[in-house]
Structure formats: structure tokens, C-alpha cells
């Protein structure tokens, strides 16, 4: 287009007819300039908008926990299965934070055998290990003097692979064995929040099948799906869930939505003989408090003990809802006492 206009410009000029065609030409040229500028602007914007969004969003590079102030945490990747790589943050006890500065993987792995209790943290649905309420729990455990290993299951965060119910507990089991290979005689406990409570009891049962067990289990905001007959499961799995447990929608969406979700915590509790502490906010808006009471009842009956199974309610007036327990000033003591009961 440009070339043609230039040619006609020359023609007009040589013909000595000046004013009008020149105006025309200038008009075309300025139009072209605007088009060019517009195109350029679009290129620039399409390149910079993602960068700007990146800068102004609360983007977290999961491989660099120190970027968000976790100065005694290291990121590691484990391979629970061929083709699956999961990201894990290892936070050492807070009293070791100074020593931890600038340390490498080798130092962290060795630190795991320092005799301090260790928690494997299994998070809930959605997001990744950098979510504030998850970091909140890790910070509480670290401040009390424990190691924390916070896992992103396959398909979550920067972990590769497809999230399935059995895949999630395969990852947790792998992490447990990885920890045990380095932890000496330290207590190794598990903390399962929300969906992670289902992964926790599934993993505990898988461990039992290998003749092993966690030293203690903490379930926070834990849910119960109850029993589902196999035929029901496939015919009207979802309507059944919705009807009986409306909050289950929350768990079924993203990223497990395409997989049938069972989490037979009820059945699992019949087999588990590990001390369990159940933490639940009375105002939990996603998993009703009644779910915790039911889990408590089932576990207490299965273990035939008031000592080994505890339920700690958090008053609704505190406003913790489903994720906020980490804010409780009494939480460190509650955890400490539970761990002391394990050593006794
Ligand atoms: C992890 O979550 C943070 C928000 O907490 C988000 O900014 C980040 O993009 C997520 N990363 C991945 C890889 O999912
Ligand atoms: C490192 O983390 C610890 C524990 O959270 C904190 O007390 C300390 O102030 C932090 N140090 C720096 C230099 O950020």
C-alpha cells in the first residue's frame, strides 16, 4: 500500500499538480503512520502486560521460599513415581534460623535428623504450598521447634502429574519414607487440613499395609464423606454427595474435578491406631463442625480410648472459619501438649 501511494505521489509531482494530491498523500501517510504506531503499541502491550501482571500480582516463585521471607526454608523436588515430580518446602525449627542462612540441601537433610519432631503437612484443595494459611501453620510448628515438610501433591503448584485420589497419597507416602530415611529416632507426625485430612487417613492406611505408622495425626477442618455403595458411586455419585454433604462441592472442583473422589475416612479410622487430634473451628463455613464431632466419635470408638483421640473446638466467635486456626494464640501449646502425650 505504501509503495503504491509513493508512486502516485511522484506521478502527481512530475505532473506539476501540487496542492491537492499532496494533501491526499499526507493524509494517507499519516494514516499509515497511525496504523504502524497502533500495531507497534499492540506489540509492546502484548509483551508488557504479562510482565506487568507478573510484577503487580502476588506471584510466588515456589523454588525460592526465601523470596517471601521464609528464611529457614528450602525447596526440594522429589520423584514419587516415574514422570511425577513434586515440590516440597522443608522448614527447620525456628531456633535454627540463623544457622540455616545460605545453607544447601545437604545441610537441611542432615538437620532433619537433629532430634526435633517432624511434621508432614498435607494441604487442602486448590492453590499451593505458598498460601498464607499454610505458611501460617508451618510457622507455628517451626516456632514450637519442629521441622515441617509441606508438600504440593502431583498436579498442584509446580508439581507435575495428574491429581488423583490414590496419586495424592502415593506422594504423601513417598515423602514419609524420604523423611524416615533421614529422621533418626525423631517423631514423625502428619497434619492434614481439609482435603488433606482425607489424604492423611488414606496415607495412614497405606503405611499400615507396609507395617509402619505415623507417630501422631492432626486433622484440621476434616471432612467425612460417609459410606458410598460402589453402584451408587458411578450412577449418581455427585448428586448423592451434594445431597448429603453440600460442602463437598468445594472439594470436587479444581483440580480433582475429573476424578471420582471417595476419601473413605470413616473406614480408614477403623484401622488406624495412631493418636489423633482433631482441630475444628465451630464457625467453619466449608466443613460443618458436626463433621469433626462425627470423626471424633468414630475414631474414639475404633481406638477404644479417650486418651488417644482428642477433639479441640475453636469458638465460633473467633472467626477462624475453615482456614484461620493458625492465628490462635493458644495453638502452640495445644500442639506441644499433643506431642508430649506421644512421647509419654
Ligand atoms: C502458587 O500460589 C501463589 C499464590 O499464593 C501464586 O501467586 C503462584 O502463581 C502459584 N504458583 C504456582 C506454580 O501454582
Ligand atoms: C528469619 O526468620 C525468623 C523466623 O521467622 C525471624 O525471627 C527473623 O527475624 C528472620 N530474619 C531475617 C533476617 O529476616
Image: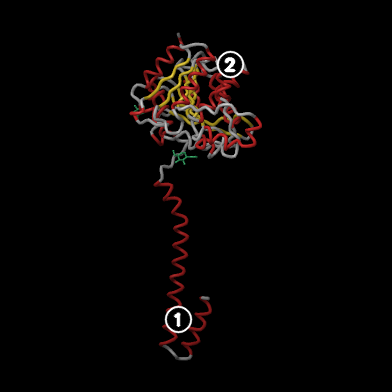
Label 1, on which residue?
Answer: 25
Ranked by sequence position, the earlier of labels 1 and 2 is 1
| Residue under the point 46% across and 10% down | 343
Residue 168 image position (x, y, % from top left): 57, 30
| Residue under the point 53% across and 77% down | 3
* Front residue of this view, candidates 155 and 126: 126
Q: Which mark is residue 55?
A: none
Separation (CA) of disc 1 from disc 2: 85 Å
238 over 142 or under it: above or below: below
Q: Residues within 10 Å of mark 1 (few under 14, many from 20)?
A: some
Instruction: Name the element at disc 2.
Output: loop
Decide if ligand 1 comes within 8 Å of the CB at mark 1.
no
Q: Residue furthest top?
A: 344
Q: In the visual, does 64 lie left or right of 261?
A: left
Q: Residues within 10 Å of mark 2 (few under 14, many from 20)?
A: few
240 over 45 or under it: above or below: above
Label 2, on which residue?
Answer: 212
Which of the image's four quarters has the C terminus? Answer: top left
Instruction: Name the element at disc 1.
Output: helix
Residue 38 image position (x, y, % from top left): 45, 66
User: Contact (CB < 8 A) between labels 1 and 2?
Assistant: no
Amino acid at each position: 500500500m505504501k509503495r503504491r501511494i509513493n508512486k502516485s505521489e511522484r506521478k502527481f509531482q512530475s505532473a506539476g499538480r501540487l496542492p491537492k494530491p499532496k494533501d491526499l498523500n499526507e493524509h494517507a501517510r499519516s494514516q499509515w503512520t497511525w496504523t504502524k504506531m497502533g500495531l507497534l503499541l499492540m506489540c509492546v502491550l502484548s509483551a508488557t502486560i504479562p510482565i506487568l501482571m507478573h510484577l503487580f500480582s502476588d506471584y510466588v516463585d515456589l523454588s525460592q521460599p526465601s523470596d517471601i521471607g521464609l528464611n529457614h526454608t528450602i525447596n526440594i523436588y522429589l520423584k514419587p513415581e516415574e514422570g511425577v515430580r513434586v515440590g516440597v518446602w522443608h522448614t527447620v525449627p525456628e531456633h535454627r534460623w540463623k544457622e540455616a542462612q545460605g545453607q544447601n540441601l545437604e545441610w537441611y537433610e542432615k538437620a532433619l535428623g537433629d532430634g526435633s519432631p517432624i511434621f508432614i503437612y498435607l494441604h487442602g484443595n486448590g492453590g499451593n504450598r505458598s498460601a498464607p494459611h499454610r505458611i501460617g501453620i508451618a510457622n507455628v510448628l517451626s516456632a514450637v521447634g519442629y521441622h515441617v515438610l509441606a508438600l504440593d501433591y502431583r498436579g498442584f503448584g509446580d508439581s507435575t502429574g495428574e491429581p488423583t485420589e490414590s496419586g495424592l497419597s502415593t506422594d504423601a507416602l513417598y515423602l514419609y519414607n524420604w523423611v524416615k530415611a533421614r529422621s533418626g529416632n525423631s517423631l514423625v507426625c502428619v497434619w492434614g487440613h481439609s482435603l488433606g485430612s482425607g489424604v492423611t487417613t488414606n496415607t495412614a492406611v497405606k503405611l499400615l499395609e507396609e507395617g509402619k505408622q505415623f507417630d501422631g495425626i492432626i486433622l484440621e477442618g476434616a471432612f467425612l464423606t460417609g459410606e458410598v455403595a460402589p453402584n451408587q458411586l458411578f450412577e449418581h455419585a455427585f448428586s448423592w454427595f451434594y445431597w448429603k454433604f453440600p460442602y463437598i462441592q468445594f472439594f470436587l472442583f479444581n483440580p480433582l474435578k475429573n476424578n471420582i473422589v471417595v476419601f473413605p475416612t470413616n473406614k480408614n479410622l477403623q484401622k488406624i491406631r495412631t493418636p489423633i487430634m482433631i482441630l475444628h473451628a465451630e464457625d467453619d463455613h466449608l466443613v460443618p463442625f458436626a463433621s469433626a464431632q462425627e470423626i471424633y466419635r468414630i475414631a474414639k470408638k475404633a481406638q477404644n480410648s479417650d486418651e488417644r483421640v482428642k477433639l479441640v473446638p475453636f469458638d465460633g466467635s473467633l472467626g477462624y472459619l475453615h482456614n484461620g486456626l493458625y492465628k490462635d494464640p493458644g495453638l502452640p501449646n495445644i500442639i506441644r501438649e499433643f506431642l508430649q502425650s506421644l512421647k509419654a
